[in-house]
Amino acid sequence: MKRVGIMLVQLLVTAAGLWYVFHDPQKRAQIADALRHASLNWLLLGWICYGAVEVLATVRWQMLLRIQGISFTWLRAFAIVMIGLFFNIFLPGLIGGDVMRLYFVFKLAPRRKTRATLSVAMDRLFGLLAIAFLAGVTLALRFRWFESAGPALHVAYLTLSLLGAGIACVIFLFLTVSFGLLHKLPKRLPFRDVIIQSGEALKLYRSHSLAMIGAFIITIGSHLAYYLSYYCAARSLRAAAPQIPSVSDMLSIMPLVNTITALPISFGGVGVRETLFQELLSNLAHLPPAIGALAASLGFAIQATWGLVGAAIYLLWRNRPTA
């Protein structure tokens, strides 16, 4: 019942966000016209940028697996990452992709299930730290820019609140590991299993400091490639909006958008992302609201096409022997 309730909330938030952004007939007409004149070259470039996201994610995960003594071919690791992407996009929440990654790793390395689980936990932790780092840098460097528009400032404050909560959780995790309290946590503590898995991953990986620094740099690069895919989506609409946000503007708003859409309050951030793009880009970059929302949808569509590649891989591998 709890899971059903969460899904209903996600569905409601997604539907409300999409209705808010696209219910105006004038906006829909503007969006239809913009789509007719969208640049396929820029959309293709955005598709390539997002492909780099998953390639870098594969490199990072391979590093984490090999530290644990688990070795796959690059092609097989990439295929598993892509299958995880499909389930992340098309299933509620973010846990679906992680479960599928572990399912395939367990079949390939059945004697190393614990180590495989910790590699995925550490992979997820790197993503959280990268979002927090990039959002923090953005707010530190461009807070006055966000102050120039009321709605944007509200988004900045919300992001700061979420960052504060995230940093507090990371500090709590480090202290729990440092003082050996990981398995003494109350059984009723929310997300206890996730905290324990993340803590065990930290204990195992902290002796590989150089590899961890490299993995963090790769994660930052992956996030920047993701942000650029949305810039390309916006740039493809140049014919419908003479003033398209600059690369620096897009790189500035994306960490905030990413921080908020990381919350599992809608399906894949759909509806929430469009609303944030509409408000931020219209107030800060003077982009027509309809075009801003469309840029968000196109950026997500680029990601979803890669998810469909993962679906095709899953269908090809489902009935094949894994070893």
Image (tube, grey):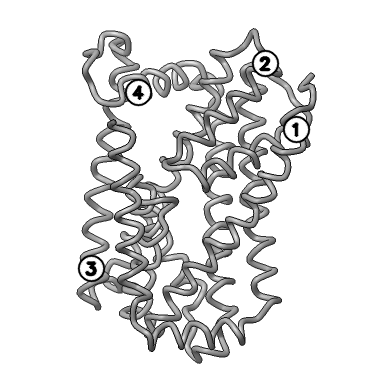
Q: Nearer the viewer, residue 287 or 319?
A: 319
* Residue 63, horizontal then vertical, whole percent: 64, 30
Per the image, the residue denoted by label 2 is: 69
CA gap, disc 1 and disc 4: 32 Å
Q: Is label 2 or label 4 in front?
A: 4
Name the image quarter holding the N terminus: top left
What amino acid type is highlighted by mark number 4?
Answer: Ile
Per the image, the residue denoted by label 4 is: 195
Q: Which mark is residue 276?
A: none
What amino acid type is highlighted by mark number 2?
Answer: Gly
User: SS class of the residue under badge 1?
Assistant: helix
What amino acid type is highlighted by mark number 1?
Answer: Trp
* Residue 99 located left or right of residue 80: left
Nearer-N-terminus badge (1/3): 3
Does the residue at mark 2 contact the one at mark 3 (Cβ under 8 Å)? no
CA gap, disc 2 and disc 4: 23 Å
Per the image, the residue denoted by label 3 is: 153
Does the residue at mark 2 contact the one at mark 4 (Cβ under 8 Å)? no
CA gap, disc 4 and disc 3: 32 Å
Vertical relation: 167 (above or below) 30: above
Nearer-N-terminus badge (2/3): 2
Q: Is label 4 or label 3 in front?
A: 4
Residue drawn at the location 34% of the way across and 17% of the way down = 177
Q: Is label 1 or label 2 in front?
A: 1
Residue drawn at the location 30% of the way across and 56% of the way down = 13
